[in-house]
Amino acid sequence: MNKFENDCLKFLLKMVSTKSLSKNEKAVSQVVAKEMRKLKYDDVKVDKLGSVIGRIGNGKIKILFDAHTDTVGIADIKQWKTDPFKAVYKTGIIYGRGSCDDKGCVASMVYAGSLIKKLGLLGDFTLYVSCSVQEEIAEGYGIDFLLNSLKFRPDCVIIGEPSNLKIVRGHKGRAEIKITVKGKCCHASIPDEGENAIYKTLPLIKGIIKLNKKYIRLRRTQLGKPVISVTQIETKNASINTIPDNCSFYIDRRTVEDETKKQIEIEIKRACGKKVNPVRSGTSCYDTSNRIKIDYLKKFFNAWVLPSDHYLVESAVKSYKKAYKKNTEVMLWPFCTNGSFTMGERKIPTIGFGPGEEKFAHVANEQIKINDVLTAVKFYSVFPLTFSEKKIK
């Protein structure tokens, strides 16, 4: 491993060892900004949310590389073989929370900027490398804030997320829904005197299960089929010997192209039963007779697909061949990224590419191969000049 590669490894290990749960990215942002300055980026800024943006060049065509620095938390630390917030490097693999999702991509993109300068791969483009925050809890919020502060519209965006070094031209969207059921509390020794809110959620959850089975029979789109799951159940109760008067459960709904927020809302209402005739209040629906409240949380994240013959996809394929002397597979992601904002909402041509395997994201013993990280640097380094030359033509 030469000095450049070793420095990239050290940077990644430092990031993984710097805890950065969503909304708590300040420490890792400082690590990233310091590294960009050490690598002699032309300009480095940290915005008010904590996203870091580094600039290389000053050309006409604006290219944005984006990877996020925040991570999800830890469900059960006992499942981890190592400390999730202390990077471990063993037999070519980095272990730790955020190694795969998404700090491996951050390291590749940051070091690609440095390599572009070292090798003189400059042209009539300006490359911005953004290491954005709060992606895990609100795709698009961090990068939206960042782009608004920069006051420019990129000509294209590459989203750095685990793709196993394959080019991605689209992905599913996502909707988050919370359903709350009201009951009547009483002492657990006389349950018939109350209405157990947990029990009242059961037919609603069965309705969601039935809805997912319905999706299986739908016609497959480019992005596959919609998926819906109940992911969390909670109740606020005075004690374990009290019948609960409330119970909420959360739904994760993955969308495919052309689905709308209105369509999702109608399906959820129907899944809750014909008696649900909600009164709208902001982003919530409330059925006063059944005492069922439906909250459509945060934002509707759009699904998107870029045509396979789009000049951005063609530039990415050409860049891949230049970097690795072979052809590649162009695929679609089943999960959601900041691309829901850049392409799904703002219609900025976007692709995805990154080191790491999707199966290691969000799980215990998260990991990434350093060779994949270093391999990704080559693609990111070749792409800006290849894209800018093609766009100028």
Image (cartoon, helix red, strand yellow):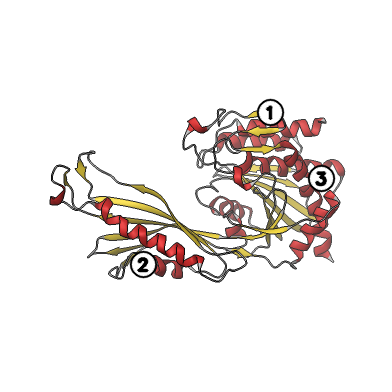
Q: Which mark is residue 240?
A: none
For the point 76% across and 65% down, the residue is 311
Which-is-in-front pick, marks 2 and 3? 2
Query: Label 2 belongs to which residue?
Result: 269
Mark nearer the N terminus (2 vs 3): 3
Q: Which mark is residue 116?
A: 3
How far across and how far down the image is residue 296, in percent? 40, 60
Residue type at mark 2 is Lys
Residue type at mark 3 is Ile
For the point 72% across and 59% down, the residue is 330
Q: Is residue 21 visible?
A: yes
Q: Does residue 54 appear to the left or right of 136 in the view shown?
A: right
Q: Does residue 372 appear to the left or right of 274 in the view shown?
A: right
Q: CA distance from mark 1 to mark 2?
A: 50 Å
How far across and how far down the image is residue 112, in percent? 76, 44
Q: Is residue 83 above or below residue 59?
A: above
Q: Is residue 385 visible?
A: no
Q: CA distance from mark 2 to mark 3?
A: 52 Å
Mark nearer the N terminus (1 vs 3): 1
Task: Say which of 218 and 262 sits in front.
Answer: 218
Task: Say which of 87 and 45 sits in front.
Answer: 87
Residue type at mark 1 is Lys
How far across and how far down the image is residue 115, in percent? 81, 42
Q: Are marks 2 and 3 in contact (CB under 8 Å)?
A: no
* Number of numbered discs: 3
Q: Secondary structure at mark 2?
A: helix
Task: Say which of 134 and 188 sits in front.
Answer: 188
How far across and how far down the image is residue 253, in percent? 47, 59
Q: Secondary structure at mark 3?
A: helix
Indicate the quadrant containing the C terminus: top left, top right, bottom left or bottom right.
bottom right
Query: Label 1 belongs to which residue?
Result: 90
Which of the 4 image quarters holds residue 33? Answer: top right
